[in-house]
Image (cartoon, grey):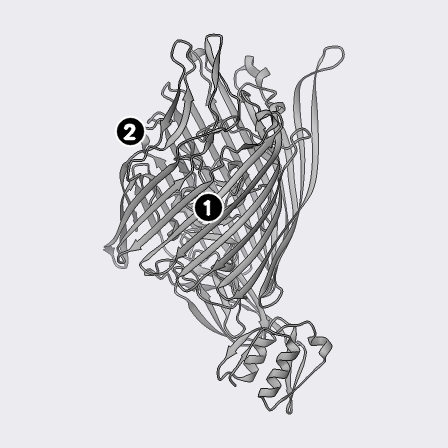
């Protein structure tokens, strides 16, 4: 029959069908009351197929009895098809791939381990599996039992950008996702400084994500500070994601498989930060054949190897990168050109059997930076992750992880002679155990629950010289734990609900030194703090059409760790992390956002707005120092912060020319006791206006061009209104906090890439990519920071140091 059915009362829909057919419909009105039918436009479609789609998600089924069609609670057996979606070329699991049952217009997206599960009634179906940059695959299924089916997709080399395919509201597509996904191919389609592909720099090109100064890896997202982002590498927390004070991130592009960004709705399985979650998944290595790849640019050289441990059952990856600043002698104002950094990524996995897999990954990164006076600053991250994936059954997926993370920072203190020089060290170490369950109950009902425990050890600041131990900042030991539950539901054909609750707990024990009893004897006393807080989150979406979405999100988040900084300077190595305590309460954020997305064919239009209320926001008193200051924690003041903003964006996703035009308006105000006389002031990362344009033009399969433009309001700063003399030095006098601004910021970067192959032997070929580009095409002088002359013998003045000017570069990479 041919009929158009609107989303309406199910009872009226049954009467409507009865008028167009020779059948009588029999049902209990109480069972159909308050239920709605799914809409559809059917042309010469069997009545059985129409009824299956109309009744989908209602829990009702049908049966033919003579000339009657009986509508009753569904007693058809449910069957489950599950498995993993992988890249056929290398066996890499694909995160966020779409798996759809065509007849039911139902589907799911693969999770962060590439796993999917669909429970549907017994029957014959067509299943489609798709992923951006890969050929869509169709499978014909006869579901009479549960089926475990792994799927491998062929890469589609001529695919330029992600294509938005119109699907049912029950099938995941880009406008329905609560997170942004970036594959390594997408990360490489942008111009970067000196040709170094960089995860964090690519995120800074996104709308609403701000970098307060050029060359910094700091991410300031929707009114949040840089330390309010949860940054993960294979589930391990990264406390300092930068090399060279932020000029480069710690994420080697050769070792990255996928990056996920959450900034609207944050699922309850993530916590501990206020602004965003950034999930970096390390690539697992090719499980089919061996490859060596590498490259060189003016910033660094890199090499990596991957291959099967056991073909199709296990693989490995090793990737190494080292800076070449000391080779090319690049001139930087922040550090001596003999400074170097390096990092190493390694990962191995093994499929024990059809239900169990093991994964182990490590990361080691180190910076050795020298000042012009040869004082050094060494810092680095070490992480280790052991994961076990287990299929409890065809509908329940379990991941158990044991994680180690260690961030340390060692700084030489200035002295007149080497014999007087001492060192100052900060560190934070974590041990984490967590278990995450995913229950695929139905295609429209997905449940996640789990638990996590983190043991933190904080060393906010200590000297290695025995005579300076009295200046050490007391250490802390903390336990952070969480239980969570989150669910994704299709309430109807036009409403989708995501909600969750995270119950977080935090216990801290702080060492206290220099405490004396009544008789003057030195004693040691510890101080404990305990916090327990519920964190509800929800996202409700209204879907007026398959290619439109209106959503409302709310998150209540708590953060029990904070970064102590006494300067708005982005290039700072003073990064002590301290936990919440009785005096410094946990940070809290109430975040409400409203958005609209529309995806007509090759475009995606989006508009969103947000308001955020942040409480217990820490800030150091003016002139407070961190180094050799054992009472620095008592000099932290807390207050509130109000943030709001609007974001508009147009994406072109198909054709030879693709790109994004984005504009955001945002404000961030703070009010903190004992700072700025208790009056409200703008935050140091308050940047009201920002305009960004990215473009990628694919001339042919070999040659492509990329560009990036940014304009933004200058960031705030505090300038002195005068000076006074103290011990031969001029000490600045400040009145208001952040009452001045740097000049407006702008920059244009361009690049071009040329790819070609050289036959080596047999089926083996050597793939080459030569890239050239120009950073800051029109040589804009963007300020980095300001410094004050403290000498009492010279004229008082404030000097501005400018950033990186016009800089051409060339880079080369290969894979064999």
Snapshot quadrant of residue 75? bottom right
Describe the element under mark 1 as helix, strand or loop. strand
Picture layout, residue 314 above or below residue 26: above
- Say whether residue 149 is visible: yes
In this rendering, would 629 be left or right of 745? right
In this rendering, would 489 be left or right of 752? right
Q: Residue 497 — which label?
A: none
| Labels 1 and 2: the sequence-earlier one | 2
Snapshot quadrant of residue 438? bottom right
Describe the element under mark 2 as helix, strand or loop. loop
Instruction: Report the residue marked by disc 1.
Output: 664
Whole-percent x, y for residue 413 in the image: 46, 18
Picture layout, residue 103 above or below residue 712: below
Tell which of 1 and 731 is nearer to you: 731
At horizontal 50% and vertical 48% (from top left) the residue drawn is 646
Residues packed near mark 1 inside 10 Å, few (<14), some (14 to 19) or many (20 plus):
many
Instruction: Report the residue marked by disc 2.
Output: 329
Whole-percent x, y for residue 543 in the image: 55, 64
- Say whether residue 448 is visible: no
């Amino acid at each position: 029959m041919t009929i158009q059915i609107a989303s309406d009362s199910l009872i009226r829909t049954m009467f409507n069908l009865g008028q167009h057919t020779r059948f009588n419909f029999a049902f209990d009105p109480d069972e159909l009351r308050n239920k709605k039918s799914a809409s559809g436009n059917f042309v010469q479609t069997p009545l059985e197929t129409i009824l299956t789609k109309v009744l989908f998600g209602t829990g009702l089924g049908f049966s033919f009895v003579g000339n009657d069609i009986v509508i009753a609670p569904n007693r058809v057996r449910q069957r489950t098809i599950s498995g993993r979606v992988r890249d056929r070329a290398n066996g890499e699991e694909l995160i966020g791939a779409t798996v759809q049952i065509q007849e039911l217009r139902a589907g799911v997206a693969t999770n962060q381990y590439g796993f999917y599960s669909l429970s549907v009634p017994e029957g014959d179906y067509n299943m489609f599996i798709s992923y951006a940059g890969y050929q869509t695959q169709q499978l014909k299924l006869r579901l009479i039992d549960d089926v475990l089916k792994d799927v491998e997709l062929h890469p589609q080399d001529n695919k330029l950008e992600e294509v938005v395919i119109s699907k049912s509201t029950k099938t995941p597509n880009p406008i329905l996702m609560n997170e942004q996904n970036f594959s390594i191919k997408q990360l490489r389609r942008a111009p970067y400084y000196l040709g170094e592909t960089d995860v964090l720099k690519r995120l800074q090109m996104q709308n609403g994500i701000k970098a307060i100064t050029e060359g910094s890896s700091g991410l300031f997202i929707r009114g949040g500070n840089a330390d309010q982002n949860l940054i993960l590498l294979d589930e391990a927390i990264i406390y300092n994601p930068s090399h060279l004070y932020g000029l480069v991130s710690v994420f080697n592009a050769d070792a990255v498989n996928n990056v996920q960004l959450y900034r609207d709705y944050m699922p309850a399985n993530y916590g501990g930060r206020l602004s965003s979650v950034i999930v970096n998944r390390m690539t697992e290595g090719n499980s089919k054949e061996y490859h060596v790849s590498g490259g060189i640019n003016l910033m660094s050289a890199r090499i990596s190897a991957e291959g099967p441990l056991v073909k199709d059952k296990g693989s490995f990856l090793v990737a190494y990168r080292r800076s070449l600043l000391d080779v090319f002698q690049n001139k930087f104002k922040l550090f001596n050109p003999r400074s170097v950094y390096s990092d190493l990524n390694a990962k191995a996995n093994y499929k024990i059997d059809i239900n169990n897999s093991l994964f182990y990954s490590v990361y080691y990164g180190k910076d050795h930076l020298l000042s012009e006076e040869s004082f050094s600053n060494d810092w680095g991250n070490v992480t280790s992750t052991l994961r076990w994936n287990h299929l409890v059954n065809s509908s329940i997926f379990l991941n158990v992880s044991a994680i180690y993370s260690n961030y340390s920072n060692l700084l030489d203190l200035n002295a007149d002679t080497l014999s007087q020089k001492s060192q100052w060290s900060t560190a934070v170490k974590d041990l984490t155990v967590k278990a995450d369950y995913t229950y695929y109950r139905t295609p429209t009902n997905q449940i996640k629950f789990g638990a996590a425990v983190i043991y933190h050890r904080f060393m906010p600041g200590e000297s290695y010289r025995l005579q300076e131990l009295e200046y050490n900042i007391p250490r802390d030991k903390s336990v952070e734990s969480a239980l969570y539950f989150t669910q994704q539901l299709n309430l109807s054909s036009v409403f989708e609900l995501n909600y969750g609750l995270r119950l977080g707990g935090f216990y801290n024990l702080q060492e206290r030194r220099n405490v004396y009893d009544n008789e003057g004897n030195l004693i040691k006393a510890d101080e404990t703090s305990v916090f327990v807080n519920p964190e509800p989150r929800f996202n409700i979406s209204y879907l007026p059409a398959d290619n439109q979405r209106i959503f409302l999100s709310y998150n209540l988040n708590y953060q029990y760790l904070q970064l102590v900084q006494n300067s708005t300077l982005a290039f700072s190595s003073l990064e002590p992390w301290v936990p919440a305590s009785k005096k410094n309460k946990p940070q809290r954020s109430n975040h409400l956002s409203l958005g609209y997305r529309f995806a007509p064919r090759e475009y995606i239009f989006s508009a969103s707005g947000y308001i955020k209320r942040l409480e217990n926001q820490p800030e150091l008193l003016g002139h407070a120092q961190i180094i050799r200051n054992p009472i620095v924690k008592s000099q932290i003041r807390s207050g509130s912060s109000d943030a709001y903003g609007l974001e508009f964006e147009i994406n072109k996703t198909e054709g030879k020319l693709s790109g994004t035009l984005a504009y955001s308006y945002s404000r961030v105000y703070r009010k903190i006791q004992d700072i700025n006389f208790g009056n409200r002031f703008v935050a140091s990362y308050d940047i009201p206006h920002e305009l960004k344009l990215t473009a990628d033009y694919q001339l042919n399969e070999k040659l492509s061009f990329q560009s990036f433009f940014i304009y933004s309001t200058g960031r705030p700063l505090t300038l002195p209104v005068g000076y006074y003399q103290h011990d031969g030095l001029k000490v600045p006098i400040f009145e208001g906090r952040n009452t001045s601004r740097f000049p407006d910021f702008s920059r244009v970067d361009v690049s071009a890439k040329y790819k070609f192959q050289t036959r080596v032997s047999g089926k083996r070929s050597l793939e080459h990519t030569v890239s050239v580009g120009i950073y800051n095409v029109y040589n804009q002088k963007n300020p980095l920071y300001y410094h004050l002359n403290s000498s009492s013998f010279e004229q008082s003045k404030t000097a501005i140091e400018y950033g990186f000017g016009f800089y051409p570069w060339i880079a080369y990479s290969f894979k064999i």
